[in-house]
């Protein structure tokens, strides 16, 4: 068996087309959806990410404003800028690119963003809404993973899903989303004993720990769906995920590649959250 690929690039293109249609509908009513992106410091990866996010937004008709600030920016100034964007009715989504400089409190900065404009889905209010099944904004990476499962027509009800990773950004919200689809969910992490014994029971595995080869072929049940969220570098410096792709693809039924899998979908779901925020603001 060789697994079928879940093409994140192709699916992201479909999502962007849908967002373009929704954006055009709002513009016809005189509303310009607007995403404000804040970049503090000169982290090379963050510069690339924010550039792509702005370009994606413009491609779908969304207005994207990228605000750059020096790493020396006082935390109080950043919080003041966020408050100003909260109060600006022309801005529908606010994103502060992480990581931020070490002298700033990440939690305080995230919580300063108005929940109605929290298109990253990181605010405590967003997490709480997901937990209790109320409308809110889902974090973009797990949201994208769920969209990928939907794209292959996968029925999660009654299935056993294993999430490797317990971060607030991916692992925990991913588990809640899967639970919301009536899957039976197990969360594994760095303290889990005999990880393979658990993953071999899984119908769906989401690997999100940022560690190469955390999931190998002998740890996967034949025919399972494997979603690889990891972003690492191999010995040759090439981008790779958390999954031993070459081995696992010979066992799994479906698998996401790295690159070209979850990454494009994360950016696509940011656009979905932004247009949703604009639609809610427009009533």
Image (cartoon, rainbow, N blue to C red):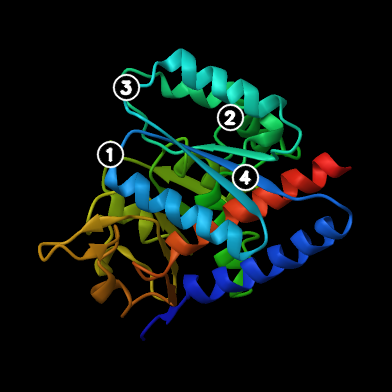
Q: Which mark is residue 69?
A: none
> Circle 4 sits on which residue?
35
Kindly state the secondary structure of the residue where label 1 is placed. Answer: loop
Kindly report the distance in space between the C-alpha atoms of the residues bearing marks 4 and 3: 24 Å
In the image, residue 52 sits, relative to residue 13, either above or below, namely: above
Kindly report the distance in space between the C-alpha atoms of the residues bearing marks 1 and 3: 34 Å
Question: Does the rendering let one see residue 186?
Answer: yes
Q: Earlier in the sequence, mark 4 or mark 3?
A: 4
How many neighbours does mark 4 have within 10 angstroms: few (below 14), some (14-19), or many (20 or more)? many
Q: Earlier in the sequence, mark 1 or mark 4?
A: 4
In the image, residue 172 sits, relative to residue 203, either above or below, namely: above
How many neighbours does mark 2 have within 10 angstroms: few (below 14), some (14-19), or many (20 or more)? many
> Circle 3 sits on which residue?
72
> Circle 1 sits on which residue?
190
> Circle 2 sits on which residue?
123
Q: Quadrant of the C terminus?
A: top right
Q: Nearer the viewer, mark 4 or mark 2?
A: 4
Q: What x and y, as percent, mark residue 24?
A: 78, 63
Q: What x and y, as percent, mark residue 32?
A: 76, 50
């Amino acid at each position: 068996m060789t697994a079928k690929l879940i093409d994140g690039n192709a699916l992201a293109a479909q999502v962007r087309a849908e967002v373009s249609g929704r954006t055009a509908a709002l513009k016809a009513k005189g509303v310009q959806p607007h995403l404000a992106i804040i970049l503090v410091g000169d982290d090379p990866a963050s510069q690339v990410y924010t550039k792509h996010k702005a370009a994606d937004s413009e491609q779908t008709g969304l207005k994207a404003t990228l605000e750059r600030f020096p790493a020396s920016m006082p935390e109080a100034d950043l919080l003041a800028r966020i408050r100003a964007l909260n109060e600006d009715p022309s801005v529908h989504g606010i994103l502060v690119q992480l990581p931020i400089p070490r002298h700033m409190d990440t939690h305080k900065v995230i919580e300063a963003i108005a929940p109605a404009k929290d298109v990253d889905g990181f605010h405590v209010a967003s997490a709480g809404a997901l937990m209790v099944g109320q409308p809110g904004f889902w974090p973009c990476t797990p949201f994208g993973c769920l969209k990928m499962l939907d794209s292959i027509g996968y029925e999660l009800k009654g299935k056993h899903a294993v999430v490797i990773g317990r971060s607030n950004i991916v692992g925990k919200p991913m588990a809640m989303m899967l639970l919301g689809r009536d899957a039976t969910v197990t969360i594994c992490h760095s303290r889990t004993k005999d990880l393979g014994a658990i993953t071999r029971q899984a119908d769906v595995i989401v690997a999100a720990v940022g560690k190469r080869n955390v999931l190998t072929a002998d740890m996967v049940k034949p025919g399972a769906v494997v979603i690889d969220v990891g972003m690492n570098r191999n010995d040759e410096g090439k981008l790779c995920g958390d999954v031993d792709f070459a081995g696992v693809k010979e066992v799994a039924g479906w698998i996401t590649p790295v690159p070209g899998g979850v990454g494009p979908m994360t950016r696509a779901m940011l656009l979905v959250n932004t247009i949703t925020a604009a639609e809610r603001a427009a009533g």
